[in-house]
Image (cartoon, grey):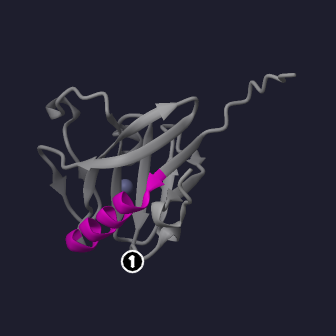
Amino acid sequence: MFFKNKKIERKVLLDKTVLDSIVTFCKMKHPNEGILILKGKSKKGQIKIDGLAIPPFNFTGPTFAGFPHSFLPFDNSYIGIVHSHPSGSAEPSVTDLNNFFGLVSLIIKSPYDDDNSIFAWDSGGNSIPLSIDDESKTEKN
Ligand SMILES: [Zn+2]
């Protein structure tokens, strides 16, 4: 017997190795903002992030990191962006929401230390549950 569950639970699954790369990149950029393109797949509300791309152009400064979307090559594995907030706040700014790209925006706040420093947001500034996919801790079937 099947019961249809119409409510789609949105969820972001972030690969641990991708998180490690984001952390390294953002620490390197500090005190400026760092920005990277997220690569992955989306299926039934579940967004799986398994890679990164460096934007072809980017402008970074202490308060804004961005790039012109028109310079982005068409690639349907690009599902969002991640950027850092050296100020230590993980909330998306109005500028962030105006420059929203793709399905999800990740923000990692200073000091970029652990899983608790990174948050996922949708284009409306609502948070999406984020979990870290650590393969070394997952039992293989
Ligand atoms: Zn921002």
- The relative height of residue 15 versus residue 85 in the rendered view (above or below) is above
21 or 94: nearer the viewer: 21
**Residue 91 image point, x, y percent:** 49, 58
Residue 62 versus residue 139: which sits nearer the camera?
A: 139
Q: Residue at x 15, y 49 (%)?
A: 58
What residue is drawn where x is 46% and y is 43%?
48
Does residue 24 belong to the magenta stretch?
Answer: yes
Q: Quadrant of ligand 1?
A: bottom left
Q: Is residue 135 magenta?
A: no
Q: Position of residue 79 (x, y in %)?
A: 37, 36
- How many numbered badges does the structure rendering display? 1
**Residue 90 seen by the camera:** no
Q: Residue furthest right?
A: 1
- In x, y percent, where is residue 80? 37, 41
Q: Is residue 97 above or below residue 90?
A: above
Crowdedness near tag 1: few (<14), some (14–19) or many (≥20) residues, C-alpha within 10 Å: some
Q: Amino acid at mark 1?
A: Pro
> Magenta segment range?
14-29
Q: Main secondary structure of the magenta part?
A: helix
Q: Is residue 96 visible?
A: yes
The quadrant in which the N terminus is found is top right
Q: Is mark 1 within 8 Å of ligand 1?
A: no
- Relative to 11, 9 lies left or right: right
Judged from the image, the secondary structure of the residue bearing numbered disc 1 is loop
Residue 71, quarter of the rendered image: top left
Residue 43 location (% of width, % of height): 52, 30
In this image, 1 relative to 134: left or right? right
Residue occupying image coordinates x 21% and y 62%:
61
Residue at mark 1: 111
94 or 129, which lies in front?
A: 129
